[in-house]
Amino acid sequence: MSLRTVHAACPHDCPDTCAMRVTVDTAAQRIVRIQGDSDHPPTHGALCTKVSRYAERVDHPERVLTPLRRVGPKGSGQFQPVSWDEALDDIAGRLGAIAARDPQAILPYSYAGTMGLVQGESMAARFFHRLGASRLDRTICASAGGQALEMTYGGKLGMHLEHFAESRLILIWGSHSIASNLHFWTFAQAAKRAGAKLIAIDPRRTETAEKCHQHIALLPGTDGALALGLMHELIVNDWLDHDYLARHVQGWPELREQALAWSPERTAAECGITADEVRALARDYGTTAPAAIRLNYGMQRVHGGGNAVRLVALLPCLVGAWRHRAGGLLLSASGWAKPVKNTAWLERPDLLAGRQPRVVNMSTIGDDLLRETDTSPGGFGPKIEALVVYNSNPVAVAPESAKVVAGFRRDDLFTVVLEHFLTDTADHADYVLPATTQLEHWDAHASYGHTWVLINEPALPPRGQARSNAEIFRQLAARMGFPEPCFLDGDEQLAANAFTDAVDREALRRDGFVKLAVPEAPFAEGGFATPSGQAVAAAPGVPLPTHVRNHECALSAPELAARYPLAMISPPARHFLNSTFVNVKSLRDIEGEPLVEIHASDAAARGVADGQPVRVFNDRGSYECVARVSPRARPGVVNGLGVWWRKLGRNGTNVNQLTHQRLTDLGAAPSFYDCLVEVAPL
């Protein structure tokens, strides 16, 4: 057996972005071992359960290995194999005909099926920029929190991951770290062994919350109120760093005045917790140093999610936590890599040549696919006639999926999907094009959970007839006659030049990763990336953050709550990553089947028994699953674990049958966890 080991990077939408070593039997072209790179400090040799099974995705028996053309009704999943030439010629011809009328009638749809800079938005972006297609506002995961960080800190900036090991108090806020960022959890456990206190703030009692010293189970969408209540207590007890506030926080007097209106009693009533919990949490945070907050994106998937992130992000400034390298906050660190990404070269926005195509929000795709042409001033513009989907599964993951399905089933919509499997979305395609997996192509990666950049080398030749995303768009560009030399750049060239000269490219190829030059305690003396250099609570053009209630809750929509009295959140099941890995049998066997967690008191009131099939419903639809009567659910809140493929569910739906398309206060993001439902036995 001849073995070869290459550097790889985890491609999935996870903050940890692990460095991997992949060992291959070169004679058999078979994966022998996939392991975390022990030399990479954030990864330290470990992989999550999902990615450790990556070989099962590469050699999955249901993998799409040849181009497919639809022969049955949309949604039926009936296809026949065709050659690459036949598929690409037809696709280019049909896109070209639409573009001749109005290229904005063509829409790309993609997100984080791979987080790579090459197989994500490099050649694809060049192609759609040159075409003049509609632009996609990629909001579906993180744009509310991202805009909030940019308003507050000047960018998506935060602590170093590894410094959490030195913290004395860690608030794990809106994060199921064991499932969603395992490597942070390793550092948190190290801090815990050294005597640190861990507190989970989450509506659901996750496995992470169970392993913390305390769990505060607030109502969904009340995180901003809790942050204001903590500020109230920090002020009245003078647990403040007055010097840091005076020198490094803009708008502090206005924020102070607002926070003083949020007594523990008012905060507790809004959040569904006790006033004593508010007081004790504030005391811990105000009197323990260094104190760190690991915030995650679940808490910003509600109407007021952006304002809530702004308020939480200001907490470290009140107590001077940023003075310590083990103090502060981490939601996203992706902004540290922004200056070293060769984004303009990778994506070539200059190919728009002065055109300004409309922008379509990916979170409202359900409505937008059903819109007719409207060329009036401020109107929608041309009807969407063609959709090219890559790195995403919108039929499963987009909100209000009944409308998404109706849009994808339009006979007059031409749909192309680049995929590994026949997902819910691929079932609705006119063409499915087989894409390579992470182990079969070149890529380059940054991270939003640590401060390293990584390279990914192909460990295997593509299985079957699979081609990389970049290669597919490169060949479409050739068939459409795009003459620019940039469409000849190969995948290895794109990966090699994905970062500027500020990154040591020789070290990147040799070691597989390079650490960014980020200060150990980046805001110890202020120096935020805002125009003033201060963290911003309020400034000209930047209003004071405040608590914004959910679109759907008893206080904002009492009539709706009378009919649908249960709040529902829909976090990913532990062994899935959104809709990725759902078809890996070993992982699906662990999850069992789609379920909703419900508190015993809510179950008893509805005659629901543990393990009983139930109907979860609201005005948008009905979703059938199994009830799990569980202390993981707090009273008044149910947890619809997702994101199952619709066709693997009980009645061909998933939890997004119930979610709506109303957007967040900042970032125009979806409000997945801002949803009222009722539950009844089947």
Image (spheres, grey):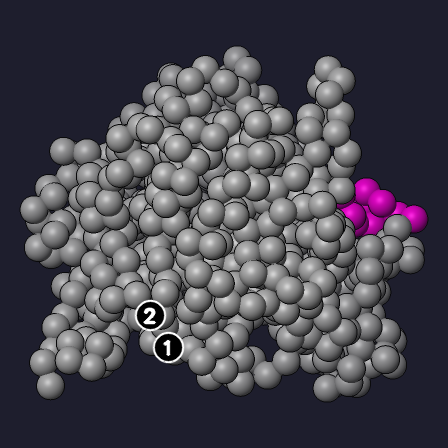
* Percent x, y of residue 16: 34, 57
Compared with 172, 358 (above or below) is above
Q: Residue at x 76, y 42 (%)?
A: 370
**Is residue 377 visible to us here?**
yes
Which residue is labeled 2 in the image? Answer: 463
Mark 2 to mark 1 CA distance (whole Å): 8 Å
The answer to which of marks 2 and 1 sits earlier in the sequence is: 1
Q: Secondary structure at mark 2?
A: loop
Q: Is residue 68 left or right of residue 527?
A: right
Disc 1 packing (10 Å; few <14; some 14–19; many ≥20): few
- The one nearer the camera, 175 or 594, is 594
Magenta region, residue range: 549-559
Q: Which residue is mark 1?
A: 59
- Secondary structure beneath dot 1 equals loop
Amino acid type indicated by mark 1: Asp
Q: Who's the residue at 86% across and 55% down the image? A: 619
Residue placed most toward the observer, 35 or 307: 35
Between 184 and 474, the residue placed more toward the observer is: 474
Which quadrant of the rendered structure holds the C terminus? Answer: bottom right
Residue contact between numbered discs 2 and 1, judged by CB atoms under 8 Å? yes
